[in-house]
């Protein structure tokens, strides 16, 4: 299993909508590095659901249920989407400030590149953030 962080602006599509829908197409990504990550996702991979902008924080966990396919929202170019479903909300959101304050997470992509919308996380980082949400 691989682990990821997927990011969304809650004004566009937040955790509230993810829970309401239960499952969604993770589309609309227009970044080459993020596209490569989407194409590397496998069925069963787990993703931290990160809400950005006003209150940046990890709020839940989703699972990849359909691997990369052509993004139906793309008018031009070779873009990809995956389908994800809700696994669980975190007991307590873990803010970007919380993550940056943890020396154990200093190498996390999010700490150094908050703009990348789809990014890998290690198993250790994934589990550490879940542990942080229970503190």
Image (cartoon, helix red, strand yellow):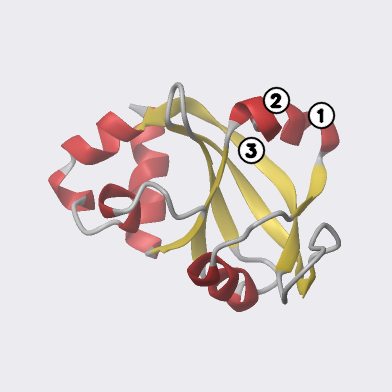
Above or below, 109 relative to 85: below
Q: Nearer the viewer, mark 1 or mark 3?
A: 1
Q: What residue is shown at x 29% (from left), y 56% (from top)?
A: 108
On the image, the x and y values in percent for residue 17 come to 75, 29
As drawn, the label of residue 20 is: 1
On the image, the x and y values in percent for residue 56 come to 42, 30
What is the CA distance from the residue labelled 2 to the residue labelled 1?
Answer: 6 Å
Mark earlier in primary sequence (3, 2): 2
Q: Secondary structure at mark 2?
A: helix
As drawn, the label of residue 16 is: 2
Q: Residue furthest left?
A: 103
- Residue situated in front as seen by the camera: 61 or 76: 76
| Left or right for 132, reference 49 | left
Q: Quadrant of residue 125?
A: bottom left
On the image, the x and y values in percent for residue 83 come to 77, 59
Within 10 angstroms of label 3, few (less than 14), some, or many (20 or more) residues? some
Residue under numbered circle 3: 88
What is the CA distance from the residue labelled 1 to the residue labelled 3?
Answer: 12 Å
């Amino acid at each position: 299993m691989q682990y990821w962080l997927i990011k969304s602006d809650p004004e566009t599509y937040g955790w509230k909508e993810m829970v309401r829908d239960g499952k969604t197409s993770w589309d609309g990504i227009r970044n080459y590095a993020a596209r490569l990550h989407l194409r590397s996702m496998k069925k069963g991979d787990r993703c931290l659901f990160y809400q950005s902008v006003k209150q940046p924080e990890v709020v839940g966990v989703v699972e990849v249920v359909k691997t990369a396919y052509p993004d139906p929202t793309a008018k031009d170019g070779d873009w990809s989407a995956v389908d994800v479903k809700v696994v669980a909300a975190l007991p307590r959101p873990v803010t970007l400030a919380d993550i940056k304050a943890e020396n154990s997470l200093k190498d996390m992509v999010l700490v150094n590149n908050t703009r990348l919308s789809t990014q890998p996380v290690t198993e250790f980082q994934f589990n550490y953030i879940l542990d942080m949400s229970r503190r």
